[in-house]
Each structure stands twice: as C-alpha cells, then as structure tokens.
Amino acid sequence: MKVRTRFAPSPTGMLHIGGARTALFSWLFARHHGGEFVLRIEDTDRERSTEAATQVILDGLQWLGLDWDEPPVFQRTRQAEHVLAVEQLLEEGHAYRCYCTKDELDAMRAEQRARGEKPKYDGRCRHRSDRPANVPHVVRFRSPDVGQTIVRDMVLGDVVFDNAELDDLILLRSDGTPTYNLAVVADDAAMGITHVIRGADHLNNTPRQIQLYEALGLPVPKFAHIPLIHGPDGAKMSKRHGAVAVTEYREAGYLPDALVNYLARLGWSHGDQEVFSRAQLIELFDLAQVGRTAARFDQQKLDWLNALYLRQADPASLVAEVRRFLSFPTEDGPPLEHVIAALQERSKNLVELAQGARFFYQPPTSYDEKAVKKHLRAQAWPLVAAFIERVEAMGEDFSGALAHQAIKELCAEAGVGMGKLAQPLRILLSGGPVSPPIDITIELLGREEVLRRVRDGMARLRA
RNA sequence: GCUCCCAUCGUCUAGCGGUCUAGGACGUCGCCCUCUCACGGCGAAAACAGGGGUUCGAGUCCCCUUGGGAGUACCA
C-alpha cells in the first residue's frame, strides 16, 4: 500500500518550530517511501482559526521546501461527514446522548479530584432511555471499560492503556459540531492516511482514537509519536525562549536548508553524520532511527549549520535573499555577488552578511573609536600617506593584488608588520576594525573610492 | 493527584550484551595559520542519574527510586 502521511496544523497562530519538525518528519517519511504527503487544516475551532494564520503556515512549509501533493483539506468543510459518523456510532450503540450540564460535570470532576482520582466522566447518562426534546445534549462515545488498548508505536514501541482509564469522550458538542478526536479519525480515514506521524503530546489521545477506528469499522493507521522539542531550559518551547515561529528564523537570516538539516538532526540520526543534503535526508530517513527523548533547541548548533550552508552556497544564488535584508542601494557600488563572495564565510546569517556589506556601498560616517585609538596613532599616518602616493601612481593598473604588494613593500621598508598599514587602511575604508581581507576590500571598492575614503579619513582623523 | 512517555559529555547524539580504558558534532579552553574578523588545522577538559536484579559478562535486558516531560476540556 502506498504511504500517505499528513501534517494537520490548526491555524491559530504561527508555524511553530516543533510543528515544522513534525511536518518535516512526515514529509521525509512519505518521500522516502515514494508516497504522498498531504495537508489538513484543522480549523474547527472557529473562535481562534484565521485565514491569515493558514497562509502563514503554508508559506512557512513552502519556504522550508516541504511540498504537499494535494490541495489542503479544510476540516471545517467536512462537518457533514463527521456528523454522519456519529450517527453511525449512535445507531450501532457505540455512542449515546448525554444531557449533563457544564456545572454538573464541573462538580463531578471537583469531587473526583478531591478524592484523589483522575477526573473522568462517570457515564451517568450511559443508560438513559428517555430522550427529552429541546434539551441541549452532546453525544458521547461508549468506550469499553474493561480490557486494554495497545498503541503499536513505530517510535515508542507498544504502549498499553487500561480501557478503564479512558472515559466516554464527547464526539459531538451541544451545538452539533464535532470534536477533535472524532474529526481526526474520520478525516485520516477518509484521506487514506497510512501513517500518522505527530508530536508525543498526542500519545494520550491515541488509544481513544484507535477505539473509534474500531467502532467505525475503519482500518487503523500506523502511529509514530515523535518527542517534543524543548527550550534551552528543558521546558516546553515558548515565546520566552526567543524565536519559536519559522518566520522569525527567516527574518533572522537563516537558510531553509540549514534549518531543515538542523531540525532533522533533532531527534533523528544517521551514525555520526551531521550534514545532510535534502536528497540524502530523503534517502536515509527512517522512523526506526528517531530517538525517544525530548530534545532541547540549541541555537548555537543551528548557527553553526547556517554558517556552514552560507559559506558553501553559490554567491549568485544568495543575491536575491541578501537583498531582502539590505537597506541601501547597491547600484553605485561593486557587484553584490562579489561582495557576498567576500562576506559569506565570515557571516553566521544573512542579517550579518547584509550588515557587513553596508560599507561597500556607503562610506563610513564615523569611525570605531577603539580601533582608531589603537591603530591610527601618529606613526601610522606616514605609511598611509605613502600608500596614497603608490595608489595614485598606479593609474589604470590598479588592482587588489597590486595594492596588497604596495602595502607589503611599504611595511617592509618601514621594518614593521603588514598589520601596521592594513589595519589603519581597513578603518579608513570601512569605519571599523573588521572587514574582508584588505586586498579584496580594496579591489571591490575600486581606486577612486579607496583614494577618496583614505584622503577623507586622513583629513578628519589626523591630529 | 491520576495515566502515559523519557533518562549517555553543558547541548544534539552514536551505541541496538562482549569490539566501550564509551565514538562524533555544536559549544568551551589551549596551540598553529594570519593584515582584522572569519575559515581551516592540531590538541584538551567534559557523560552512561542512583539502587537492586538477570547474565560468565550490562551504557545496552528487567524492577524500584529520583529527576524531567506530556495528557487529564463541549481546544486542537
């Protein structure tokens, strides 16, 4: 049977980093097996679901390169089927109408809690035979109260639940709308989902869902619950840990391939390998190699991977992405592609890269104070002046290599290291103590701009 | 409280009874390279939560304790 997996987010906010990993694992599993990956938007919570959130989630998946094979199913549109399923259950005696009020239930749970029991519906409406008209009611599942339900999980192994622990869950609310557990089962079955891959927070729902599949006479899919992602402090990932939405990573200048690689390695492994191309991920991914322990999100390792992908990227392929982060025009300066080539191995992300690119297009308006104090002392200026003369003399022959040679010679003549001139020049050209190698920086800026900035800086800074 | 899940360096993990004086990666700390920052190279410190079993032999299997986490809704 062809593998079909799904990702089923509820559109109530952003695409969470944990959700993104769940989607990734589902996608990888499907692609690995030559199967299909589909989406279901669980928008049955009308209060909280928004169209904008749906779009954000879709955009996020797209950005990560997790493509889906069919138009997304909107759960809200399937309500009629859900009601039909409940009616079937009602007819076959697997469900019953419950007339308990909210207050009644609250009181019952409070008592149970007070007695130290697990709060659960006691089934008091199970045997009601009357059917009062015009009284609001819900429909409950008549769950077996003896025996066990075993979840055969592809990650966790067999997990056994005593049926006595599971109470009669609500299938249909008093307003006639279906609840989550019923909708999931009906939809996964209707969509032909063969493998349900989801977060471990759903494990406790699974035995109930299995019971529903069985009561409805539907084939039970395979389940795989993947461990949750925690924040650096071990608690559930939340806003206070920093970025949790994938859009935030996009805005912070991360590359989708790097994020995918990082997320894949969070919980899954293939021996000692750390870096995987997308094709390798698809080829090697296996649920059996997914661990059972919750993983903490480690920004530093993500940074390392992102920097790795950044410096290995073809500069031309980065141009459009880098432009998103630029706040200045680049027409009058060196080709952006060349600037990227000079910067990519010294940047952790696109934001850093964009910052580093600025001085190539905008002359410094001020100079780093500490750097000036350290490198632009009195003895530096004669060297700088000599450098200007050498560049002036170059005329059309100007190049980074020649400038480099000139610096080397001048320093040798003065009996000092190359840094004695390179650092002053760097500050004059870029405004600070950090830039790509001085010859490359000079070459990119060009003869006129180099002369202008050095002269200008000398005028402003020479005591 | 109750149910369920989990437990190897600070972090992600390899390990699927002997090959473990426990391997890799990020991070950290040294050294080298060097015009700055990076990159790169070399090296170091750093873990099997505790206690019982099973076995000739346990990081690997079982139990308990402890510690994390999830669930416990007319949310999904």
Image (cartoon, coloured by chain):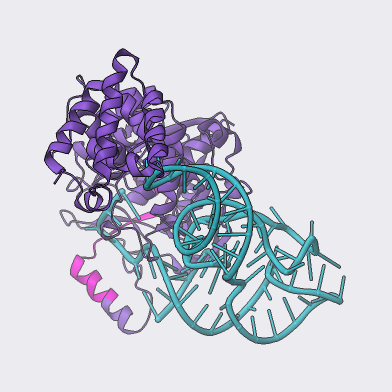
Chain colours: A purple, B cyan
- Write down the region rendered in magenta: A86-109
Q: Position of residue A355 (x, y in %)?
A: 25, 39
Residue at left 35%, top 59%?
A169
Q: Is residue A214 left or right of residue A410?
A: right
Q: In this rendering, is residue A269 above or below B6?
A: above
Residue at left 56%, top 53%?
A155
Question: Which sits in the foreground, A461 or B43?
Answer: A461
Name the quadrant of the N terminus of chain A.
top right
Q: In this rendering, is residue A346 above or below A179?
A: above
Q: In this rendering, is residue A155 above or below B61?
A: above
Residue A10 is at least partly visible in this image? no
Residue at left 23%, top 72%?
A106
Residue A271 is at least partly visible in this image? yes
Question: Which sits in the foreground, B11 or A22?
Answer: B11
Question: Which sits in the foreground, A378 or A46?
Answer: A378
Q: Position of residue B47 (x, y in %)?
A: 59, 71
Residue A365 location, quadrant: top left
Residue B13 location, quadrant: bottom right
